[in-house]
Amino acid sequence: RLGTPALLQSLGDRAGERYWICAFCVNQHSSICGGFSPEPSHGTQEHSDWDNARRDTVTNNIYPLCKCGQPKYFNDSLVECELNKFDSVMQMLSLEPNISQVVATDLKFEVFERAWCVAELVEADCLEIHQELILHDGDCLYPHCERLTQLSVRSCRASRKEDEEEIIRKIGDTEAFDKHLQQLLFRSSGLLRTRKNHMDQLSAVARILEVQASPD
């Protein structure tokens, strides 16, 4: 059952909507549940970020690792691996009627610095999948505008170095990809330019930094 009658009533027609969420739909037990990503060099910002990511944000305790013992498959197992097929999944999902991609941003907009995330954004745009940007609030965007106009997939990160290399390999022409990403964000119908509360500010930033878009 989906829940209580009151909850179903409040959701209305939305109660029947289906969502693909990678954290749930990709079998974590066949990939990353048994360990953390490789530890960076001590004393670096990368090590600090790595250490923070493996800790509970409330207790600061290191997350316990899973002991399921299920075989793990990564990029060197092309068929069995579930982490390397986002483009194929998106192509399949794009055939569904009324499909949309929901882009839920964090306060620091770090989602746009994750290699998998920006690759999925551009793939969805290529497949003409409707995209919806969800912000924490109307004031969190503008402080990050200039940084967002300088995004490049070559500086984006993934939890595993092998994943970064695989994404870059699939992209091929990273310069063309970066241009497409900027157009996706800042063209007149782009994800960020359509935020009404900051449209004038974003337009000014785009003009100043000469972020040009292709015709809609």
Image: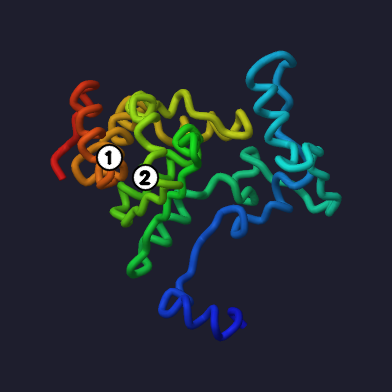
Rendering coords of residue 58 (x, y %): 73, 42
Secondary element at image label 1: helix
Residue type for callout 2: Gly
Disc with the residue nearer the chain's start (1 vs 2): 2
Query: From the viewer's perspective, is residue 57 above or below residue 46?
Result: below
Residue 16 placement, left or right of 190? right
Counting other residues with Cα less than 10 Å from the Cα at mark 1, is it few (<14), some (14-19), or many (20 or more)? some
Q: In this view, does 114 lie above or below 16?
A: above
Bin the neighbour count of mark 2 within 10 Å (Cα to Cα): few under 14, some 14-19, many 20 and up. few
Quadrant of the rendering where the C terminus is positioned: top left
Left or right, residue 59 beside residue 37:
right
| Secondary structure under the numbered disc 2 in the rendered image | loop
* Residue 195 sits above or below residue 94 on the image: above
Task: Name the residue furthest bottom.
Answer: 5
Q: In which quarter of the image is residue 154?
A: top left
Q: Which residue is drawn at 61% across and 53% down?
A: 23
Q: Quadrant of residue 78?
A: top right
Tag 1 near tag 2, CB within 8 Å: yes
Q: Where is residue 46 in the image (x, y as percent from the top left)?
A: 64, 22
Q: In which quarter of the image is residue 54?
A: top right
User: Residue shown at 65%/43% (left/top)?
Assistant: 77
Q: Which of 199/26 is in front?
A: 199
Q: What residue type is labelled 1?
A: His
Closest to the observer, 192 or 76: 192
In which quadrant is the N terminus drawn? bottom right
Label 1 to label 2: alpha-carbon separation? 8 Å
Residue 138 disc label: 2
Q: Which residue bears the numbered disc 1?
A: 198
